[in-house]
Amino acid sequence: MSTIADVAARAGVSKATASRALSGNGYVSAETRLRVEDAARGLSYVAHSSATSLATGRTQTVGVVMPPVDRWFFAELLAGIQESLFALDYDLSLYGVPEGSRARERLFDQVLPRRRFDGIIAVGIQPSARELERLQRADRPLVSVGPYSAGSSAVSIDDTAAARIATEHLLDLGHTDITFIGGSADAAELSIGDARRLDGYRDALDAAGLTAQARVTHASPTMPGGYAAAAGLLGDRRHRPTAIVGVCDEAAIGAVIAARRLGIAVPAELSVVGIDDHEHAEMFSLTTIKQSPREQGHEAVRLLTLRMSDPDAPAEHIAAASALVVRSSTAAPRQ
């Protein structure tokens, strides 16, 4: 296996010059750089990551902190992050830990401060636990996806507006008995995104003069969670709503499945709208608010590379686009 010393000898330069030429750190004339690169190709030389780290002070590794990737949104987001990092020859260290767990506390207090990363991408951080502030104290370039503070770069959607638009769509169709499905009954366990979507639902009803009509059926943001919540809600014929807003598409799809099993026609007897445009939304003809987590992953890496190249650059917040996608799960209520 060839070494940097072999490359330097073939190119007729010192090891330090060869290292600068291949790493791009430090001045080397264009002629010398080409000669060193030709020598490296001729010897099939590949720089060892540890050696490169010692020479440049960089690890070529980005730490990614997010909830477990068993939900579509986080899996798609991670795929986007990984695609962009791979294109930049960066490695990824993933820490997928549940909110509120002891493992998460240890991650923020002990693990991350000791690890060497060129930057960190934090997904779904919990403001109530002051996680963003704890990451900022690690003094590394940082980008968050979702909640953010004034001094940090971030990619997010307006969760409040997304749920408001979804609810307004149902109101425009003539629905007045609309139930929100999703979100924990325990405020301490309610994620910031889900809490903002619940706020958006209530804002829409308040603006329509239907504050007293607001109903929330708590459920996990999953298909089984949405199914269980909707089955209980729809089983009571006398108090059955005419429409449902799911905190996410998974919960909304679960509600559609529950309605079908109970013999309730969607949308003739029940309208359902979700948020996210999940990969299965089209299969269930689900009306939803579209967002692209994979593109958000690309944007997060772009912002992080800017922070890594210039840590003093002003923070930048990217508001990811979202739009109402009308399919056949919503219609005017039956008269």
Image (cartoon, rainbow, N blue to C red):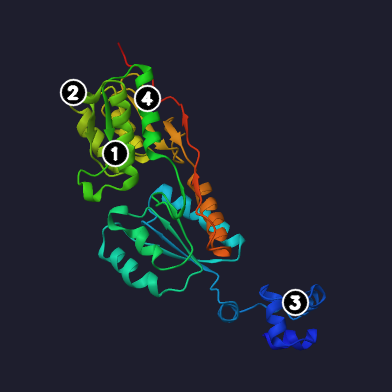
Q: Label 4 near label 2: C-beta < 8 Å?
A: no
N-terminal-most mark, 2 or 4? 4
Q: Label 1 near label 2: C-beta < 8 Å?
A: no
Q: Is residue 35 above or below residue 104?
A: below
Q: Which mark is residue 226?
A: 1
Q: Nearer the viewer, mark 3 or mark 2?
A: 3
What residue is rendered at 25% in x and 33% in y?
A: 230
Q: Amino acid at mark 4?
A: Glu
Q: CA distance from mark 2 to mark 1?
A: 18 Å
N-terminal-most mark, 4 or 1? 4
Label 4 CA crowd tier, 10 Å (few <14, some 14–19, many 20+)? many
Q: Is residue 35 above or below residue 77?
A: below
Task: Place residue 258 in its image quadrant.
Answer: top left
Q: Nearer the viewer, mark 3 or mark 4?
A: 3
Q: Which residue is mark 2?
A: 239
Closer to us: 17 or 184: 17
Closer to us: 92 or 198: 198
N-terminal-most mark, 1 or 3? 3
Q: Is residue 281 above or below residue 28?
A: above
Q: Amino acid at mark 1?
A: Gly
Q: Which residue is mark 4?
A: 168
Q: Label 3 near label 1: C-beta < 8 Å?
A: no
Q: Nearer the viewer, mark 4 or mark 1?
A: 4
Q: Which residue is mark 3?
A: 28
